[in-house]
Amino acid sequence: MGFRSSTSETAAMSLGEHLAELRMRLIRSIIAVALGAAMILAFYDPVLRFLTRPYRDLCGNRPDFNCDGSLFALGPLDGLTARMKIAGYGGLVIALPIVLWQIWRFVVPALSRKEKKYTIPFIASSVILFVGGCALAYWTLSRALEFLISWSGTEVNQAFQITKYVSLVILMVLAFGVGFLTPLLIVFLQLVGVLTPRTLLKQWRIAIVSIFFVAAVITPSGDPITLLALGLPLSVLYFVAILVGFLATRKRARNSE
């Protein structure tokens, strides 16, 4: 995949091979996402029940909220739109390991032999952190809904539109999942020398404020419970990423010596 610069013709051929491999990796990733989406569509009803369980449980535990856990389609396209959204994003989550592997296989020829050894740890950590963030978002959903509904007033009946509810769930899951990948970026920047553990420790106050500011921006519900549920773990993971980067850079320095 690397570029050869002996002649312009060879370089052009290398560029063509480079683009051909990029296309192949994209096609494989798209096929993996499509298969995952097909799997979600095949089990759509159980998946929808799983996504609406926090809302239904909340309605059962709080009769004063005037809701029964039902979702409503207010237009002929609402049901189809919700189904396609769940299938698309669910397929991406299912295909995430394959997508990450394809990205890594495209990038790996440009890396050194020492950098290639981080393949499995980075991919495994990415999947674990992303899934962990999604799980935390699902666990937080009922608390966020309880906070939001409580501001409606006791005389207001709750009737959630299916597309808006699904959009809220998807945005929360993506916000938490992508947010939990931030420590990997911090570790990577330390490994390539862009940041140092000492610099990150000196700027920890600014980093914590930035984490909570970003968490407040990306959380779709905007409630303080979701903000804390995302901001506190990311703050802890920030220091964990510094520790991992410190150990990795120190080990690499010892090996160099």
Image (cartoon, helix red, strand yellow):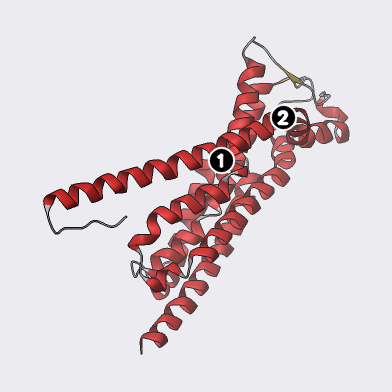
- Report crowding for label 2: few under 14, some 14 to 19, many 20 or more residues within 10 A (C-alpha): few
How far is disc 2 from disc 1 in space, using C-alphas? 15 Å
- Report crowding for label 1: few under 14, some 14 to 19, many 20 or more residues within 10 A (C-alpha): many
Q: Is residue 148 above or below residue 185?
A: above
Seen at 61% across and 25% down, the residue is 84
Image spot of residue 243 (x, y percent): 52, 74
Residue at image mark 1: 32
Q: Is residue 222 visible?
A: no
Q: Quadrant of the N terminus?
A: bottom left
Q: Amino acid at mark 2?
A: Ala
Q: How many marks?
A: 2
Image spot of residue 46 (x, y percent): 78, 32
Identify the element where label 2 is drawn: helix
Q: Amino acid at mark 1?
A: Ala
Seen at 61% across and 36% down, the residue is 35
Seen at 19% across and 47% down, the residue is 12
Image spot of residue 49 (x, y percent): 78, 31
Q: Is residue 58 above or below residue 245?
A: above
Q: Is residue 30 above or below residue 244?
A: above
Left or right, 17 with respect to 203, comes to left
Residue at image mark 2: 42
Q: Nearer the viewer, residue 71 or 221?
A: 71
